[in-house]
Image (cartoon, rainbow, N blue to C red):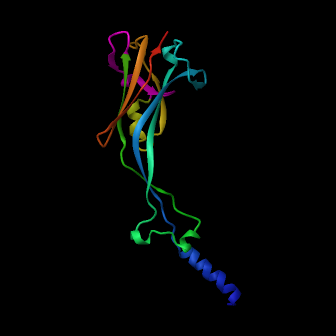
């Protein structure tokens, strides 16, 4: 082997023997946000809350707020976690590792009847994922981690008052609760 071929071969061997650092991220649910929308045929849009809407068009967007934090670059001795020139040369890396610190156990949807002494009515069982008959609890059990955001709508409007506020409350497996509240909505 000539010296001209030796250097690339040594570099290739070093390149192939190097290991890539997996980044580990910790995801924590820190809150929940919500907004009222309506279905406008094939689109979901915001609406002017000054105007009355049809109950059948009403949609609630639920967004789970997550905080992402990198907790480690690689396992091993903390003194050796500084980037090395050899490891920086490695391009193909494994996927990142994601750890969830908490998960949603349940979500409750309540409406407040503003015309009836602010009576609270639990309507969780009357809410389904948009364009399905999947309940919120089924949806959560099918996608336990990384819910992100989703849309729900009424499956039954028989006991829904004509003026409401709504409250979304998520119970997390670490014992905390997060919630979101929306302003008054008037139905036709």
Horizontally, residue 23 falls left or right of residue 7, namely left
Residue 127 lies in the magenta-colored region = yes
Q: Nearer the viewer, residue 48 or 3?
A: 48
Up/down of 21 relative to 104, above or below: below
Q: Residue at x 52, y 62 (%)?
A: 94
Which quadrant does the N terminus fall into?
bottom right
* Magenta stretch bounds: 113-133
Write down the quadrant of residue 165 in the picture: top left
Q: Nearer the viewer, residue 139 or 16?
A: 16
Up/down of 13 relative to 75, above or below: below
Residue 172: give x, y in percent of width and height.
33, 39
Residue 84: give x, y in percent of width and height.
52, 72
Q: Residue at x 52, y 18 (%)?
A: 57
Q: Nearer the viewer, residue 168 or 127?
A: 168
Up/down of 164 relative to 66, above or below: above
Residue 169 lies in the magenta-colored region = no
Q: Residue at x 40, y 31 (%)?
A: 136
Residue 88: give x, y in percent of width and height.
56, 69
Horizontally, residue 36 falls left or right of residue 78, namely right
Up/down of 162 relative to 65, above or below: above
């Amino acid at each position: 082997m000539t010296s001209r071929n030796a250097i690339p071969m040594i570099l290739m061997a070093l390149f192939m023997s190097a290991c890539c650092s997996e980044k580990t991220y910790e995801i924590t649910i820190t809150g929940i946000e919500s907004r009222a929308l309506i279905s406008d045929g094939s689109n979901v849009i915001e609406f002017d809350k000054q105007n009355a809407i049809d109950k059948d068009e009403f949609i609630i967007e639920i967004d789970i707020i997550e905080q992402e934090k990198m907790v480690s670059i690689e396992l091993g001795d903390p003194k050796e976690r500084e980037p090395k020139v050899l490891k920086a040369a490695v391009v193909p890396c494994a996927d990142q590792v994601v750890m969830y610190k908490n998960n949603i156990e349940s979500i409750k949807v309540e409406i407040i009847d503003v015309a009836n002494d602010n009576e609270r009515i639990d309507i969780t069982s009357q809410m389904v994922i948009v364009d399905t008959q999947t309940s919120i609890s089924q949806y959560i059990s099918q996608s336990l981690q990384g819910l992100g955001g989703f849309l729900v709508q009424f499956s039954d409007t028989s006991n829904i008052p004509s003026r409401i506020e709504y409250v979304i409350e998520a119970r997390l497996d670490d014992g905390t609760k997060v919630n979101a509240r929306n302003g008054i909505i008037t139905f036709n």
